[in-house]
Image: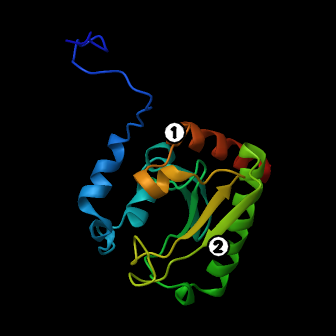
Amino acid sequence: MSEPTDDFELAGVPDAFQRLWTPHRLAYIKGGQAQFNKGEDDCPFCLAPARSDEESLIVHRGESCFVVLNLFPYNPGHLLVCPYRHIPDYTDLTVDETAEFAALTQTGMKVLRKVANPSGFNLGMNQGVTGGAGIAGHLHQHIVPRWGGDGNFLPIIAQTKAITQTLGEVREQVAQVWAEQLA
């Protein structure tokens, strides 16, 4: 019989594998994307502004749009730019909303460059369920910071992404630099 491998004295044989525990993703995996294709009353982007910035992971509030950390980030610092209005399509934005949406995207990139020094970005909007939108009812644009070598076998083979900081830590850093950027 092998020796216990932890303080709980559970059986197991040590191996060369590291374990990445991501229990927070279980709610998303169990419910799937359909859990977010709801109306304004259940939309996480409509509900977020009513809560504190820390609770909702909001890094900046503008006049017609806000910026929030992605709850299920592709990379650390993955931001979403959202209009306050519950609209599904980019063409539904007013001229003023479009201008602020674009300006917040630019500021988000500048802030992430200062916070995390990425070597590139992916920007994008998935329009409609068929277009791949996880929350199709509420328009949002992704700002994903990228670094050389940030893509590896884990997302492809194990459907796992290693994130090195908590969302709260990232939100605090991004919000602080965002405020400094505006000052």
Residue at image position (58%, 66%) is 142
- Is residue 100 shown left or right of residue 155? right
The CA span between labels 2 and 1 is 24 Å
Residue at image coords 59%, 47%: 76
Q: Along the line of sight, which residue is nearer the eye, 110 or 49?
A: 110
The kind of residue tagged 1 is Gly
**Which of the 4 image quadrants contains residue 14?**
top left
Q: Is residue 16 above or below residue 93?
A: above
Q: Which residue is mark 2?
A: 101
Q: Within the image, what quadrant is residue 134 found in? A: bottom left
Q: Which residue is rendered at x = 46% and y = 83% of the image?
A: 131
Report x, y in % for residue 132.
Answer: 44, 77
Secondary structure under tag 1 reads helix
| Element carrying mark 2 | helix
Task: Find residue 16 and report its horizontal and vertical position in percent.
Answer: 44, 28
Mark 2 or 1: the one toward you:
1
Q: Horizontal and vertical percent for residue 42?
A: 29, 66
Image height check: is 172 above or below 68? Answer: above
Mark 2 surroundings within 10 Å by alpha-carbon count, few (fewer than 14), some (14 through 19), many (20 or more) = many
- Residue 87, position in %: x, y? 45, 81
Mark 1 lies on residue:
168
